[in-house]
Image (tube, rainbow, N blue to C red):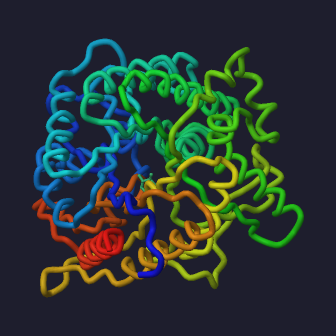
Amino acid sequence: MRRPLRRDFVWGVSTSSYQIEGAAQVDGRGPSIWDGFCREPGRIANGDTGDQACDHYHRYREDIALMQSIGVNAYRFSTAWPRVLPKGRGAANEAGLAFYDRLVDGLLEAHIEPWVCLYHWDLPQALQDLGGWTNRDSAEWFADYARLIAGRLGDRVKRFATFNEPSVFTIFGYSAGGQPPGTKELESFYATIHHVNLAHGAAVDALRGVAGASIGVIHNMQPARPAHPTPADGKAAAILDDIWNRAFPDPQIIGDYPASLRAGIDLHRREGDMERICRPIDWLGVNHYSPIYAKAEGASPLGFAWAEVPADAPRSPIGWQVDPEAFRDTLLDAHDRYGLPIYVTENGAGAAEKLDAAGGVNDVERIDYLSRYIEAMREAAEKGADVRGYFVWSLLDNFEWGAGYTNRFGLVFVDYATQKRVPKASARWYAATIKAHAAQATS
Ligand code: FCB
């Protein structure tokens, strides 16, 4: 290894509630918007659902032991809002809260720091029935939920994130389709952007009630590129960049919306809102996989259309572009623009995998991807980006949203029929990477 990262660099793995917990109808969990969406014909590959997923709800001890064997010092997971508040607000579900108690206690016993994200897309269905994020009251619903989690876990958990990838669930949920609720009305799209931002600010205030809390937010950030080097495609890419990369972190951290969004947002903005949104936070979580592309599309309400990755670009087994330099540049840009300590809260590679004849998975392409991206992160750190940690997506193969169980991102293979976990070659490789860093940091 070259020049070391910070001595206290955080090496972790990430997951999310709906993607791994299963136990969808167990111990009083209420329905989330994903439970219903998965049941709509044609939405999810093979009609898959998160009903069972990795059954992490019952197997979390085994999963903590897997993390221990990899040697991570942090675990980022999300709490399921409908598990702790089955109707989204009102009466809390003690059994749901007790699950997160057990998980947190198990992690601490294993010397793994819990990093809790409050929202990884599983909104309670009861709140969707009231309009979900299009309802301005959603900011207060979310703040109450944040207070509940802070009050219950805050004696042991200090790392909190408000949202995971707000631009992804608002774009695909309210504009492009593919995620619940699957509507495509421009006005509700702008409303959700603004209300999610208000919810973020309100939750930051709620989480400040935890002594010693270190609060952040997790954004997907990747270069938005024009499909062709034409002025029209350049303009389309700039619009996509504003919506994908800036619509949330700019108001949350800098206190203003990108110019191209202001007219749409103004319909929903009230006096004092920007101060409510822009609350001081302690770190920025960056999720990154690969660049995205846009082309001009006059008929599209937002002025752009998604475009394909260039045909000659190197790709991962599931077709996502592999471009570590884009990752390095993203980290440098995020550092320059937002000036906060950065934790890479997701990075990883998907594949359609099976156990081989020897009963293992020799995932050389994932190892190649991860090592090149970690190297790119190291370069960004050398050039001045304040990168303090890195979490692989994901610990386990899991429910990959619209792709169902076909795309596997885990360091650990999951046989969904038996729930048997089998660490892949990448799990051993990651363990060695963490060990090498620890050796260097103490030498
Ligand atoms: C991210 C999501 C995460 C996972 C990865 C592959 O956008 O946050 O849940 O699906 O992509």
Residue 25 appearing in the image = no
Residue drawn at 76 percent across, 59 percent down: 237
- Give the quadrant of residue 92: top left
Q: Please provide percent x and percent y for residue 193.
A: 62, 34
Image quadrant, ligand 1: bottom left
- The answer to whether residue 153 is above or below residue 35 is above
- The answer to whether residue 415 is above or below residue 145 is below
Side of 186 where 144 appears, left or right: left
- Give the quadrant of residue 70: bottom left
* Label tally: 0
Looking at the rendering, in which quadrant would you find the C terminus?
Answer: bottom left
Q: Please provide percent x and percent y for residue 51.
A: 23, 44
Side of 284 where 59 appears, left or right: left
Residue drawn at 26 percent across, 29 percent down: 153
Side of 91 where 40 appears, left or right: right
Looking at the rendering, in which quadrant would you find the N terminus?
Answer: bottom left
- The answer to whether residue 279 is above or below residue 47 is above
Along the line of sight, the residue nearer the viewer: 78 or 9: 9
